[in-house]
Image: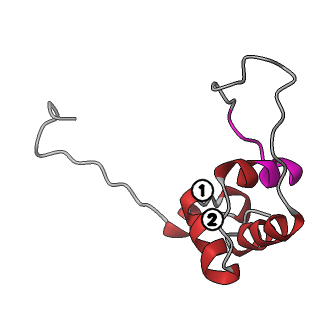
Amino acid sequence: MSKLNTKQHIDVELNLDELDLTDTEKKATYQEIKDYVLEHSGLKVSSLYIAQVKQKCGIIERENYNKPKSEDTKQPQCPPDKENAIMEALKHFGMI
C-alpha cells in the first residue's frame, strides 16, 4: 500500500460486534487458571493437573513434545478437590 497514489484511499468499515469472542473462543492461560484456583479455593494446582482436567472436558491441547522415554512411566493424577477447583475456574473463564 505504500506505493499507492496518496490522493486515493481505501475505506474500511469494521464492525466490533463481529470481533467479540464466542464462549468457545475464550481461552485462559495456565497461569490465569492457577491464580483463580489459588484465590478462590486456596489450592495450588500444577499445569499437569490443569491439562488432565481440560482433557477430561474434551478441550484439545496441542501435542506435547516433552514425552517420557518409557511408556510405563507413572503420572500423578489430579485429586478430586483440585479437579473441582479447576473445573470451577474453567467455567469462570467460559471454557466449558
Quarter occupied by residue 25: bottom right
- In this rendering, would 67 be left or right of 70? left
The residue depicted at 86 percent of the width and 54 percent of the height is 57
Of residues 12 and 71, which is closer to you in this image? Answer: 71
- State the residue position of label 2: 33
Q: In the rendered view of the protein, which quadrant contains the C terminus?
A: bottom right
The residue depicted at 11 percent of the width and 46 percent of the height is 7
Q: In the rendered view of the protein, which quadrant contains the N terminus?
A: top left
Colouring used for the render: secondary structure
Can residue 78 be seen in this snapshot? yes
Any magenta on residue 30?
A: no
Three-letter code for the amino acid on which mark 1 is drawn? Tyr
Return the x and y of residue 93 as percentages of the image width and height: 67, 70
The residue depicted at 68 percent of the width and 35 percent of the height is 62
Q: Where does the magenta region start and end?
A: 52-62
- Secondary structure, mark 1, is helix
- State the residue position of label 1: 30
Rendered position, 52 above or below 80: above
Of residues 23 and 64, which is closer to you in this image? Answer: 64
Return the x and y of residue 72 as percentages of the image width and height: 87, 23
